[in-house]
Amino acid sequence: MKILHSWLREFTDIGSDVDAVADALTKLGLAVEGVEMVGAAVAGVVVSRVVRTQSHPDAATVHRVFVDAGDGTERHVWCGAFNMSVGDLVPLATIGTVMPDGRVISSRGILGIDSEGMLCSSIELGLGSDTTGIFILPPNLQLGADIFESLGIEVDHVYDLDVTRNRPDCNGYLGVARDLAANFGKPLHVPPEDQKSLGVRKSVPVKIVDQERCARFNVTVMSGIKVCPSPNWVARRLTDAGMRPINNVVDASNFVTLELNQPNHAYDFDQVNGGFIIRSARDSETIVTLDGVTRLLHSSDLLICDSANVPVGIAGIMGGHNSQINPSTSTVALETAWFEPVGIAESVNRLALRTEASLRFERGVDPYGIDHSILRFAAILRESCPQLIVHLGAVDARTAALPPETSKVALRLNQIPRVLGVEISAAQVVKMLTPIGFLVADRRKSTVKISVPSYRPDCVDEIDIIEEVARHYGYDQLGKAVPKSPNHGRRSPLQMRRRLVRELLIAFGSSEAMPNPFLAPGDLARCGVSEDNALRVANPLVAEESVLRTSLRPGLLRAVALNQSHRASDISLFEIGHVYPQGSEILPDEHEALCVMVANSDAHVAIDLWSQISAGLGVGAQLDQDKPPAGFHATRSAELSRGRISIGAVGEIDPTVLANYGIVGRVACVELNLSILLADEPKIRVAQVVSKFPSSDFDLAFETPRSVAAAVLTKALRQAGGALVVDMSLFDIFRRAGVSPDSRSLAYRFRLQAVDRTLTDSEVAAVRLKCIAAAEKLGATLRGAA
């Protein structure tokens, strides 16, 4: 927010030391991001009168302007603006003038005719932001005089403040000045109100339909208005504060908004059909706003309508084009209101329409500052409209949703040293808080009850009051202390397990990849995953990054393809990141995932990776080959599950998917839901007795039906072998002559060992027979043994 030094000085005596004020603002939590000097005079720019203008047949975009600078000599100037008339006073930059942008005015010719200077716009002189034409000066200035002296323009300074969301009161000069006055120990002067007597009763009916969204709506009728340019001092202040002057009515409204943080809107009284209705919009309803844009509305938007229920403004954001102030306006209906902040913020984001009013309403304005702002508006407008009449009968509609005028917060004095590290007495608290409007309602030894004013909606809890104490005590006086904690800082179990996963994968020779979490439409389908439950970004920076990923596979597949295109053969990549499948609630079902891909490898490598991760984390899962995951090989992949809960997939990527990416060879892949696995508490590792007795090995090969998964047979054999089986591995799978077309051969190697004895041949044979019997129950038959 831009704050003028001279404007602040009207509220309190802050002196002329700009650096001291900037330091004080920063210490109070209103960080000064920069200080700019404005109003510096441009030597050589004088007041001149337009004597005549003349078009040139060979110059369509410029014309000749003849001016008199007070010395009786007619000067010729080429000018590209056409907004001046004969008799107008305009600023003339004479030959040799150095302009604020560094240009030096010289005699330059067009079509062989020299120009004896330059006529200036307000923006070229640093006196405004209007680029539409030449700056037309007031008619009472002396010809040849320096325009800066003639207009009474003095050097001023503008503070660029970073006002945080928790200081809504500082979106106005009054809030900033209140803090500075307290800091410097100076009195605060409230801007003067209009002191003229009120006119005859004239009011308009107001009906608040949506009483939760609009808690107060005041309409005051003012007549005797003549729409014209604002006084120079008003226009100058608005310009320096970053606003473009428009006319005296609109400028008075903007002036009060900046000064008091009280947004308001002046409607042409004759265009509102004698009344106002505040209601929610209907879906697909439209309104043409002041900027001339037709806005498509939603039922969550709040509208201000006339008595015929026709929208004349979007509440808290922008007025309508059909009721704006125009040159013939003589009576206005001034609206000042309080709207619920969250609803305004939602409409601002949905409509992509942010204004000075919405900035304040969505952060919170003072619902009880309305009366003063109305009379302040009248005082500003009376400067240009001396016949202004403020009519009696202002309508002030209120609802039960209106916040209380004051709220009370209990401050425990022992919490101040706990939070700030310094002892501050109750008397000091009162001394610091009273100048900024906080009153002590009840004062006891250990607790002080603070009455919070309505212009500070951010102060609702004890910690907010402590923050106010800290700001006015001085952050620089709090000192520095390292907080003490009974617990030493350490990684959480989840962080340690995540780190363990990374260490395991790096030990396996994998490199971590970090692809973009945003995908292009079609990327998920390209890797065999449905896009039905994918979330789209409403306002993506680029179309290629508009889909939130539901799987880590697309990014890693692109990485594998890129590496292969550069003739890299040893490719093993993993990623740990978040995925965003659509959930049942408003937010996505976001969780952390792990995906590992190894190029030129088959399902055995994927199973081995899962086994190592499973052993390292102390977790387990069932392999279900009946439900191969989408995008994986139909017969060489399996789902990892715990009952009905899927925790991932293991196997090979579908060849069709690999072809989509131009990847050659097989790709082993493990994809896991890390949020589930990392949340598990690992089983406590128990030391195992190392047997000193010899082991016995034997092999068994079974002709197994295709319908029986290898994992199912493996589990049955291990259970049948019992405690004597210390190791068992599937070492051979083949389908060829001698094996039924509907079956395949699975060969296992068993190692038996006891911790207390050497196994006899009969014990080994017994285990062997149990394993054969278990396999036969599943429909497998023994092919061979060793």
Image (cartoon, rainbow, N blue to C red):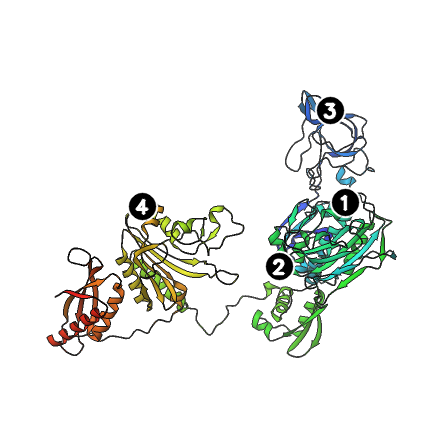
Numbered label attached to residue 247:
1
Callout 3 environment at 10 Å: few (<14), some (14 to 19), or many (20+)?
Answer: few
Asked whether the viewer can see residue 349, the reply is: yes
Q: Answer left or right for 295 relative to 328.
A: left
Please state which of residues 267 and 98 is positioned toward the viewer in this rendering.
Answer: 267
Tag 1 secondary structure:
loop
| Residue linked to disc 4 | 564
What type is the residue that disc 4 sits on? Gln
- Of tags 4 and 1, which is closer to the observer? 4
Numbered label attached to residue 204:
none
Please state which of residues 718 and 697 is positioned toward the viewer in this rendering.
Answer: 718
Disc 3 or 1, which lies upstream in sequence?
3
Q: Answer left or right for 462 relative to 262.
A: left
- Residue 214 lies in quadrant: bottom right
Q: Answer left or right for 456 relative to 614.
A: right
Callout 2 environment at 10 Å: few (<14), some (14 to 19), or many (20+)?
Answer: some
What type is the residue that disc 3 sits on? Ser
Callout 1 environment at 10 Å: few (<14), some (14 to 19), or many (20+)?
Answer: some
Q: Mark 4 and mark 2: span between their CA atoms?
A: 50 Å
What type is the residue that disc 1 sits on? Asn
Q: Are marks 4 and 2 in contact (CB under 8 Å)?
A: no
What x and y, as percent, mark residue 373?
77, 57
